[in-house]
Image (cartoon, rainbow, N blue to C red):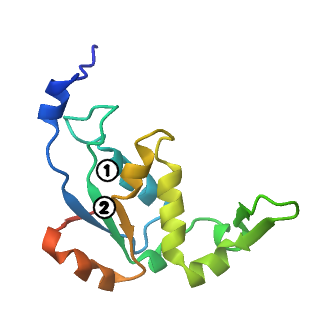
Amino acid sequence: MRTYVAKGEEAEALKVGASWFVVDATDVVLGRLATKVARMLIGKDKPSFTPYLDSGDHVVVINANKIRMTGNKVEQKIYYSHSGYPGGLKEVPAKRVRETKPEWIVREAVLGMLPKNKLRARRAKKLRVYRDAAGLARHAGQKPQAVAL
């Protein structure tokens, strides 16, 4: 089966404006949420998807503090960061990160599933993650559509 990829001006003509979507993360498994949101940011679910163009949509994730982690990840998972200096490795358990900044956990999971290319930064700007539903009021003007996962 052949796959058609539009090129040049034809691809630009197919590209339509980005839509806005709201995803409620209440009791949703983190990895499953991240894959669906990353797919929407890339635009893979659109018939006009072109690999080398940013044709994804804006996604607002609310209730990040109610995300679910399976197994013992809350106790055992550790997030690492390094300052670049000798001895600069920092380890923070997922339990502490979840209490202090749960939106960071969701953002890191989604950004980790985006392709590592020149479009990544532009796609990352289309993701907004909020701790609770109060953050949705900022985007009322865009009239985001709710997406059920």
Question: Is 33 or 127 nearer to us in this picture?
Answer: 127
Q: Count residues near mark 1 (Cα–Cα under 10 Å), then give few for <14, some for 14-19, many for 20+.
A: many
Quarter where residue 85 is shown:
bottom right
Q: Which residue is drawn at 19% across and 34% down?
A: 48
Decide: is 62 above or below 81.
below
Decide: is 60 above or below 115.
below
Contact flag, marks 1 and 2 (Cβ < 8 Å):
yes
Question: Which quadrant of the rendered structure holds the N terminus?
Answer: top left
Return the x and y of residue 113 as percentages of the image width and height: 49, 48
Return the x and y of residue 24 as percentages of the image width and height: 33, 71
Question: Is 146 or 107 nearer to us in this picture?
Answer: 107
Q: What's under tag 2, amino acid-wise?
A: Val
Q: Count residues near mark 2 (Cα–Cα under 10 Å), then give few for <14, some for 14-19, many for 20+.
A: many
Question: Which quadrant of the rendered structure holds the C terminus?
Answer: bottom left
Return the x and y of residue 76 as percentages of the image width and height: 73, 68
Q: Which residue is drawn at 37% across and 50% down?
A: 122
| Element assignment for label 1 | helix
How many angstroms separate mark 1 from mark 2 (CA)?
Answer: 7 Å
Per the image, the residue denoted by label 2 is 59
Quarter where residue 124 is shown:
bottom left
Decide: is 2 above or below 111.
above
Q: Which residue is drawn at 31% across and 50% down?
A: 40
Per the image, the residue denoted by label 1 is 40
Return the x and y of residue 129 as percentages of the image width and height: 40, 70
Left or right: 141 in relation to 110: left
Residue 68 visible (yes or no): no
Left or right: 10 in relation to 127: left
Q: What's under tag 1, amino acid-wise?
A: Met
